Image (spheres, helix red, strand yellow):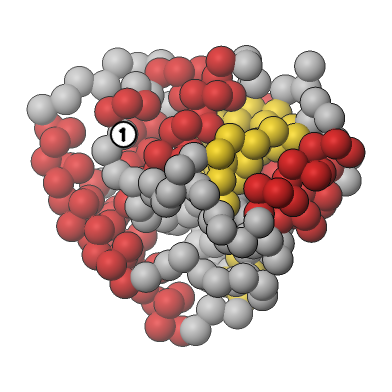
Amino acid sequence: MPDSIVIIPTYNEIENIERIIRKVFSLPHDFHVLIIDDGSPDGTPIVVKQLQKEFAERLFIEERAGKQGLGTAYIHGFKWAITRKYDYIFEMDADFSHNPDDLLKLRQACIDGADATIGSRYIKGVNVVNWPMSRVLMSYFASVYVRFITGINVQDSTAGFMCYKRNVLETLELDKIKFVGYAFQIEMKYTTIKHGFNLVEVPIIFTDRTEGTSKMSTSIFREAIFGVIQMKINSIFRKYPEG
């Protein structure tokens, strides 16, 4: 059985979903793909089910009723992947903002000793394409803020392109991960480090979507800003067994 599963949450990604799936399956490593769809009314799950006929035993879909949040989608996918014993479990967007070719780099960094890897926009300068400067600054300084509040040395704490070894996700007590929006990514990284795991940033170039509609909003950023403070306070009273 292949050792790697790529989890892709979707909501109205019909413009991108077939291309992203085919791209992942074209890579020189045998990745499986799990789509977590939150009731897309645009037909995204229909496209995935059609592709399952072509990619039997490689492409999977879990359908959920309504928009339940990015964090719960990934937690659902993590549990699904853990049960099926995948060694390397990836997070990736459906819109090509993350280059599927970089899956190979993230996996290799885990093979080379990392417990989890981040596809980092900021580890070598600012590597973002097609974002307005206001959003670049908001994202960059959000990571600066997270470092200041939490003390973790992660340049791109809000990144959504990740690879986890299975034992990391088995250790993290996923039901205790509270955030469901943008702050979910911060909480996962913070918790991974608090458990003593080695988190490594791998430089990537992030390219904003050209098809479909962004799910980002200022309210999601606000959740991250205020949520980080609450997360830090809560962590003072919590024990994190080392993995």
- Decide which of 25, 36 is in the foreground and name it: 36
Q: What residue lies at 70% left-to-right and 29% top-to-bottom?
A: 4
Specify the quadrant that holds the N terminus.
top right
- The part of the image, by quadrant, that contains residue 82 is top right
In the rendered image, residue 159, in percent from the top left (x then y), is placed at 48, 54
Mark 1 is on which residue type? Ile
Is 189 placed left or right of 167 in the picture?
Answer: left
In the rendered image, residue 55, in percent from the top left (x then y), is placed at 85, 36
In the rendered image, residue 120, in percent from the top left (x then y), is placed at 54, 55
Label 1 packing within 10 angstroms: few (<14), some (14-19), many (20+): some
Q: What residue lies at 54% left-to-right and 79% top-to-bottom?
A: 131
Is residue 237 visible in the rendered image? The answer is yes
Q: What residue lies at 44% left-to-right and 33% top-to-bottom?
A: 75
Q: Which residue is mark 1?
A: 177
Q: Which secondary structure, mark 1?
A: loop
Is 54 placed left or right of 46 in the picture?
Answer: right
- The part of the image, by quadrant, that contains residue 71 is top left
